[in-house]
Image (cartoon, rainbow, N blue to C red):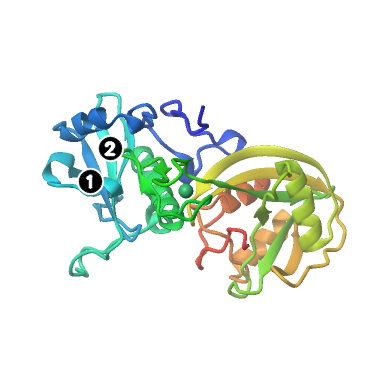
Amino acid sequence: MHPDEPDEPGATGAGGLGSLALARSTLDRAGVLRLDEAGLRVAWAREDSRVLVLHDRRVRVLGDPPRLALVPARSVTDPDEEHRYLLGRDATGACYFALDLTAPAAPADPGDPLVGVRDVGALLDDRDAGLLVHAVALSHWHAGHRHCPRCGALTRPEPGGHRRRCPVDGSEHYPRTDPAVIMAVVDEQDRILLGHQGRWPEGRFSTLAGFVDPGESAEAAVRREVQEETGVVVGAVRYLGSQPWPFPGSLMLGFVASARGDRPTVDGEEISEARWFTRGLLASELAAGRLGLPPEVSIARRLIEYWYGSPLPASPGPVGTAPVR
Ligand SMILES: [Zn+2]
């Protein structure tokens, strides 16, 4: 059985970190319906079914706080079935689809800007956040996996958008997710270890993170990444929660890790500076405008707040929390 089975409706899956911005959803993913061509046609024809139109993975929103500008499925005549993905079904039976248009939206209207997951992921309600993250993750997968990994032929998407098939050798291909670990490393004095990447603005610090290697457990990846990036030796590791990070296809697995408060020695590659912060130092550096933290939408920020014990004031600056290959 393919692991991408229907979620429990309403499950946030966020564990010890509470509800994470991009881990929210209210829909049944309707996994069986994905592969039922006739059922999909019926679902599309329902008066209450809705479509999220993606333009280069950006969408229109309405209002403040924003909600997705969904269009009635019936109003979309002759949809391109190869770029139509089933996202789920609500308790009333209404179905939600994405229509994945790679071309930019027709004439850009400055009063009607398109936005992405990073812009509105933390502002949307649970249903809309789940729809957007699901649609963007699928769009990235289709865009990056057009050819058969066995023979190189161009594969074709199957009706619900959650599988591609090779017309030459018949092999089936499913959406990929890359597990990455991200960790609040805390020492015996209850200080947190944060790192700065050379490509980030000055003063920007975040939790350490990295991709899980083939054949490696998530816990081992936490220890390896911290050691590689800072030389700090990690002891106990505890899982806290996860959220998707569809840029293009990561699943961020959040941990808290205990370590000795050794002086960090950075690798100079990914991390150019690493520092231990007490709560007092973190708060005073933030207040003085000398420290920038990752944005609200990121699990990195939630890990820092988990350690800190309360929400921290918003800080400006670009997103830079995902690990780099
Ligand atoms: Zn093939």
* Quarter of the figure with residue 239: top right
Query: Is the residue 104 above or below the residue 29 in the image?
Result: below
Q: Residue at x 46, y 44 (%)?
A: 169
x%, y% of residue 177?
54, 46
Q: Is residue 53 above or below residue 197?
A: above
Residue visible at 59% across and 72% down in the picture: 200
Q: Are marks 1 and 2 in contact (CB under 8 Å)?
A: yes
Residue at horizontal 71%, vertical 57%? 280
Q: Position of residue 263 (x, y in %)?
A: 86, 63
SS class, disc 1: loop
115 to the left or right of 227: left
Across and down, in percent, residue 296 comes to 50, 53
Query: How many numbered discs, if any?
Result: 2
Name which residue type carries label 1.
Leu
Q: Residues within 10 Å of mark 2 (few under 14, many from 20)?
A: many
Provide the residue designation for mark 2.
96
Closer mark to the observer between disc 1 and disc 2: 2
User: Percent from the top left, x then y, of residue 104?
Assistant: 27, 65
Q: Amino acid at mark 2?
A: Tyr
Comes first in the chain, label 1 or label 2 = 1
The reply, left or right, for residue 40 in relation to residue 278 is left
Mark 1 Cβ inside 8 Å of ligand 1: no
Figure quadrant of the C terminus: bottom right
